[in-house]
Image (cartoon, grey):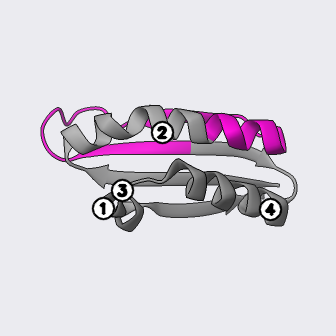
């Protein structure tokens, strides 16, 4: 079983502008895969830049999930700066 953590470090204004697109994207992924995500903001730094994180837990089929996430990401049409800042970390159960 896998757990994915996707994060973006962006200027606050850009990060806040992404929220509607990110929420729509994670809803699309949930509909396609059944994997519910959480959208988080790093605390403790109220100045520039801001870190946003999508968390996806209990992924049974990583290949199918990856395809659904890539499709939803393409549909979300995020700005180039957000795509360049986007990082994904994948973890597995021990």
Q: Which residue is mark 4?
A: 62
Which quadrant holds residue 86?
bottom left
Q: Which residue is mark 1?
A: 81
Q: Which residue is mark 3?
A: 79
Label 3 or label 2, whichever comes before in sequence order: 2
In the displayed structure, would residue 58 be above or below residue 2? above
Q: Are marks 4 and 1 in contact (CB under 8 Å)?
A: no
Which quadrant holds residue 2?
bottom right
State the image coordinates of residue 94 (x, y, percent, origin top left).
Answer: 78, 58
CA neighbours of label 3 inside 10 A, class few (<14), some (14 to 19), many (20+): few
Q: CA distance from mark 3 to mark 2?
A: 10 Å
Could you tell whether 37 is left or right of 76 in the image? right
Q: CA distance from mark 1 to mark 2?
A: 14 Å
Residue lying at 83% horizontally and 60% vertically, measured from the top left: 64
Q: Marks 4 and 1: which is nearer the front?
A: 1
Query: Which residue is at the far right?
Result: 60
- For mark 1, give the secondary structure: helix
Q: Which residue is mark 2?
A: 21
Residue lying at 72% horizontally and 62% vertically, measured from the top left: 66
Q: Are marks 3 and 1 in contact (CB under 8 Å)?
A: yes
- For mark 3, give the secondary structure: loop
Quadrant for the N terminus in the image? bottom right
Q: Is residue 90 magenta?
A: no
Q: CA distance from mark 3 to mark 1?
A: 5 Å
State the image coordinates of residue 32 (x, y, percent, origin top left).
Answer: 81, 43
Label 4 or label 1, whichever comes before in sequence order: 4
- Over which residues does the magenta segment extend? 26-54
Q: Are marks 4 and 3 in contact (CB under 8 Å)?
A: no
Q: CA distance from mark 4 to mark 1?
A: 26 Å
């Amino acid at each position: 079983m896998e757990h994915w953590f996707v994060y973006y470090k962006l200027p606050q204004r850009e990060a806040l502008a992404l929220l509607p697109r990110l929420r729509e994207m994670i809803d699309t992924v949930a509909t396609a895969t059944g994997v519910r995500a959480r959208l988080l903001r790093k605390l403790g730094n109220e100045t520039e830049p801001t870190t946003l994180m999508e968390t996806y837990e209990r992924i049974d089929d990583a290949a199918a999930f990856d395809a659904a996430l890539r499709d939803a990401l393409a549909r979300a049409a995020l700005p180039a700066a957000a795509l360049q800042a986007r990082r994904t970390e994948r973890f597995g159960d021990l």
